[in-house]
Image (tube, grey):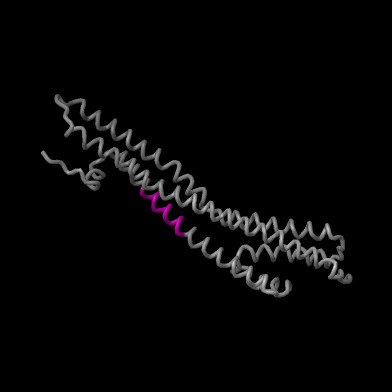
Amino acid sequence: MNQDLSILHLILNASIVVQAVMALLMLVSIASWAAIFRKLFSLKRIKTQNEAFERDFWSGSSLNDLFNAASRNAQTCGPMERIFASGMREFQKLRERRVSDVGTLMDGARRAMRASFQREMDEVESNLSFLASVGSVSPYVGLFGTVWGIMHAFTGLASLQQVTLSTVAPGIAEALVATAIGLFAAIPAVVAYNRFARDLDRIAIQQETFIEEFSNILQRNVSAQPAPAAR
């Protein structure tokens, strides 16, 4: 007798536990793809914003003009611009307090920028842990469904007098679908995680380099800018 071994038929005829595992993996896969697309658009926006700010920064605009623009656009500017604004804000506060020691000024500005850098990286790295979990756990969840399905299939064969390949194949095939769905959820998550990890490393290096370059510019300007008089 010819048996229908299509994927849809196997899923519909699987045991309740295996169907629950498949449904869970499909939901996880959908959530994973949603996180992947959100991260793609987010990283593209961050790259565009950082490159635009770097062009403005090295175009010869004054630091005060850049700081005023960053303050006005605090909600829409990119991570690098917010890091710049944090360092500039702390630098100006220390100058207004008549702090003239170069080391104190630079330490304060660097600490503010490093704190802002950590906040920005925490925000950029959101959802990466979810993709890592999907990539590492989904195959095992699918394997659990497969083991359970095979156990269920062999238990059903215990009452049969004669067991042939045609009687064993459907139950095993139903169980193996769970592993296939687990791999379907895991593989894109792992590939996306590795891609995003490389992109985040580049963003982190770019922003850390900017912090050092901006710190050098501030240090050169300290001696040229007298401390303001006390108010």
Main SS of the magenta segment? helix
- Residue at x 60% of width, y 70% of height: 52
Q: Nearer the viewer, residue 192 or 229?
A: 192
Could you say where residue 100 lies in the image, as x and y percent from the top left? 87, 63
Left-right relation of 64 to 148: right
Q: Hey, which quadrant is residue 70 in on the image?
A: bottom right
- Residue at x 21% of width, y 35% of height: 169
The region drawn magenta spans 26-37
Could you say where residue 48 lies in the image, as x and y percent from the top left? 55, 67
- Could you tell me which quadrant the C terminus lies in? bottom right
Could you say where residue 89 lies in the image, as x and y percent from the top left? 74, 66
Q: Is residue 3 magenta?
A: no
- Residue at x 69% of width, y 72% of height: 66
Q: Nearer the viewer, residue 51 or 45?
A: 51
Q: Is residue 80 above or below residue 229?
A: above
Q: Nearer the viewer, residue 154 or 2?
A: 2
Q: Nearer the viewer, residue 224 or 131?
A: 224
Residue situated furthest left in the rendering: 1
Left-right relation of 135 to 3: right
